[in-house]
Image: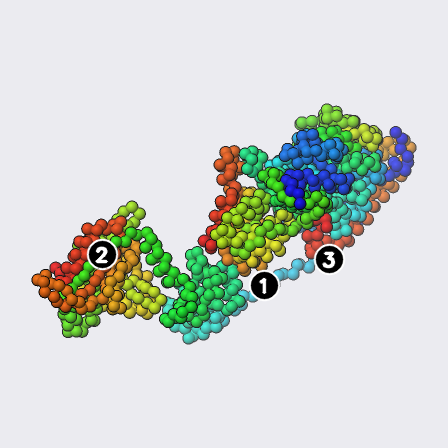
Amino acid sequence: MTLSKENATDYLLQMYQVRAFEEQAEKSYMAGKIHGTMHLSIGQEASAIGSISTLEPTDFIIGHHRGHGLCIAKGADLNLMMAEFYGKENGYCRGRGGSMHIADVAGGNLGANGVVGGGIPMAVGIGIGLKMKGENQVLLAFFGDGAASTGAFHESMILAVLYQVPVVFICENNQYAMSFAANDWTTSKKIAAHGEIYGMASSESNDGNDLMAVKKSVQKAVDLARSGGGPSLIVNDTYRWRGHSKSDRNRYRTPEEIEEWKRKDPILKFRDYCKKEKLISEKEADQIKEQGYADIEAARVFAEASPDPKVETLEEGVYAP
Amino acid sequence: MREITYLEAVREAMTQEMERDSRVFLIGEDIGEYGGAFQVTYGMLEKFGHDRILDTPITELGLTGAAVGAALIGMRPIAEIMFMDFTTLASEQLVNQAAKLRFMFGGQSTVPMVLRTPAGSGTGAAEHHSQSFENWFVHVPGLKVVMPTSPYDVKGLLISSIRDDNPVVFIEHKLLYKTKGEVPEEMYEIPLGKADIKRAGKDLTIIATGIMVQKSLAAAEELAKEGIDIEIVDPRTLRPLDTETIVGSVKKTGKVLIVHEAVKTGGFGGELAGVIAESEAFGYLEAPIIRLAGKEVPIPYNRDLEQASVPQIADIVEKARELATLKV
Amino acid sequence: MAIEMIMPKVDMDQETGTVVEWTKTDGQQVKEGEIILVIETDKIAIDVEAPGTGILNGISAHPGDVIPIGTVIAYILEEGEEIPVVKAVTPPPVAEVMQATAEPAGDVSATPVAKKMAQVHGVDLSKVAPSGSGGKVTKDDVQSAISPPASVGGGEVIATPSARRTARISGVNLSLVQGSGPGGRIQAIDVENFQPGSNLPAASVVQSGESIPLIGMRRTIAERLTDSYQSIPHIQFTARVDMTNFIKARKDYNDLALERRDDKVSVTAMLVKLVAMVIADHPMINSSLVDDSIILHQDINIGVAVALEKGLIVPVVKNANQKGISKIALETTDLVKRAREEALVGADVRGGTFTITNLGPFGVEQFNAIINPPEAGILAIGATTQEVIALDEGTIAVRPIMRFTLSADHRIIDGAVAARFIADLKTTFENPILMNY
């Protein structure tokens, strides 16, 4: 698989936007400007961008609570995303959803979810609907190793294969549910093996920090789904640098382990790849990085200047008219 | 007009709507060849085929979530959970997802699905196949809850529910399936959120849901012989509730007896009592608001015990008489 | 450029952090990401990294300080840089101190509650008679100065929302309305039927076509009599007595009373004494049936039925067998007077063990009374009229004759028991001297 310079630039920019967004989110939070909590995906950029880079604009994704990267990879407007993160009226969800529940339905992002595994059964249904519509659209359904142990996951695997839905289920194994180590009960290979047992069209596990490896694996599954070949289960082996949420004290893992994974930084990996393939030079990469951070800074300014929702509008929008 | 059973009316509503709108499909356990646990979907597989009648293995959570997802993407699924008792397994997708997606995403999404489920006791099926949880779902903003009590009502309300753009929990009392009534052959809608006065009267208001409407009508006939004239209000939709009709009736009679099968504590009767007490009707009350409801027990197997667990006609007669003659 | 180091937020609901320890000090070189500070939130220690590389300076938060999140607590400076000058933060405006409203200065010594009440109700404390120690005006004193609201039966009005609404609309004072609902609850219909201007229903002259609601005393009487009539098997025994000696005895007592300037001895007083003395020999008559036991009462408390405009009331003479006729006369006169004034209290009408009802003054020849539960019997006294009687010798005489009728509870009192009592009564009526034998 070869990349065009244009695509490579896009991907690297997105990776930096994700990284910058997460770091800014963290800063804003620590400065007391963000209410609630958030789940950062620093270190998981390759899984998000590598997977979603395989989609057409008319395809869909559905995600999980650690979904900022997925959102950006699907082409979200950074300003509206940041505004939602800040809980503002002109955020994607009018400030009602916040970090864990960002959706950009018009852009094909059917939403993040606050319940682990909450999106997986819905993914089956979306697949059923897409199939019934008959327009060859595909859905990528993201979840983590934490969801791979839920009843929702297993029921959904069964139903997805039964109805041969055009869905690629992507498990981002970042080694920990909240604090429970995935390795205590499974591995990426084992999760992928479940896919085989259930009858998935393709069941693979990848180095989740290698954008090209992820892209290749997911592309195969997407092509199968689009051509009526049914669902697949792809597992991206990766790591989150930060704790589960802002309340996480990282008691369940060692600083050494975190350092080890930091050395496998997916962004640096992709930069190396691009340099080797002569797609993006070191200097260009730095410019792209600056661009990414600047985009996020602009989003921050936009969000902080945005209006809060009015309390009088609280009860709006619960029901469709 | 021809008479059909409540069950046939449910089937007819779904069949006619599926013929009219290709986005409507069914998903549930044993709804295909088997025809559904209560035979509601009998014959529909032949008519619509496997592409629109989705039989599933035992996956309440999965199938309900699938319905939510399909609705999200623009279809209009009708999911069936064969006993309301098993909605417990599906509640994550109903309560956390279906009910909230529209609000949570600031209006970007709609979930036009119906979850149909048979509820109630009286068949000897005991603890795990006899419950009535309507109030759990009434408690969730974002859901609509409908409990039709007659063949005419069930057809019109189901058609409206399918056409509604919100997730509707549609509760059918098992013992109503065989009841007969006049049902128009053509399609018609009964608006959600509109109550029905099943019997007009002036001495006492009974607000009843589910099978208790039938029992209350029988009780009213008996009490009419004693000169007590009872008005029976059937809310039909529990959420959103037609408070206007209810308040109007209580203002008229000044005395209200609420009858439902579900357990009294935490039941819908408490909600009704609160609505009445907070309304204009309060100033017209001549006696305390009385609730007659299920006893604080899981439904037992033994027939007599099962009968004693929920209000029967004699219980309604006694309580209504007590209230009408101001013994309370 | 100076990099601000702030007190970080690390928890969802954290508002402050406590400085525990700086591992680097002012002037020392630090590297970005290096841990230079330990803070504490909720008893958990958190390591805080330097936000940049440079010289740590301007530390303004020290071990033990509790700092709000977001506050700048130090700077990372470049070589030669100065600590930024920050505008002095004006302290947040202090909430206005609420001034307690000054107590009205009073010469009058009164309790705080009394003062408040007087203020609210517009009572001049100096005009209120103090009953507290040291001449202090108390709450009760002020209460007496305020006219108490009229209320029937002790104050609290129990009425349905509908009744209250009706009362509000028609301007009826609920405390004057009798309730017909359970436990005396006032229903809307009671308010609708209420006749303003009278506490008691029905005028003394009943117009035909008028409807008298069965409420209050009327209702109570109706209920009790129905209950008695329906649940007690009444047997009735009538006896005729020659009242010659009774009348003479009464005259003698009255002569005595006149001499001693005591109250006159009424027929009622004589009846009470006579019946009490005879009952003393017939304990079964002085009993009550309670559940499965017949309780023989020790005291003989004779109730006297008194007719009122609106009904009947039965005040009781306690221990009538132990009191002299004069004393009984005093008591009965007082009781009857107070009964007619509706000034009887609970104690006056409770504890009766036997009742006498006298319709003689109305010319009723004979009648059967209904027992007053939980008593076992009631004696109905008829009129005394001159009648022709046949004497034992076969001759005819004209004597004052009275018929009395005993109604007895046949569950307790057998025919023979009743008959013996009647015989004794007759004998005593005809020989009143036996009262004291």
Is residue B43 toward the left or the right of residue C286 in the image? right
Q: Amino acid at mark 1?
A: Val
Chain containing the residue with disc 2? C
Q: Establish if B309 lies above or below C272.
A: above
Callout 3: few (<14), some (14-19), or many (20+) C-alpha neighbours within 10 Å?
Answer: few
Circle nearer the viewer, 3 or 1: 1
Which corner quadrant of the image does residue C303 belong to?
Answer: bottom left
**What whole-number distance in Å separates the C-alpha atoms at marks 3 and 2?**
111 Å
| Mark nearer the N terminus (3 vs 1) | 3
Callout 2: few (<14), some (14-19), or many (20+) C-alpha neighbours within 10 Å?
Answer: some
- Give the residue number, with chain letter if any, for mark 2: C237
Q: Amino acid at mark 2?
A: Phe
- Residue at x 84% of width, y 30% of height: A227
* Element type where label 2 sits in the image: strand
Task: Mark yes or no: residue B107 visible.
Answer: yes
Q: Establish if A272 lies above or below C315.
A: above
**What whole-number distance in Å separates the C-alpha atoms at marks 3 and 1?**
28 Å
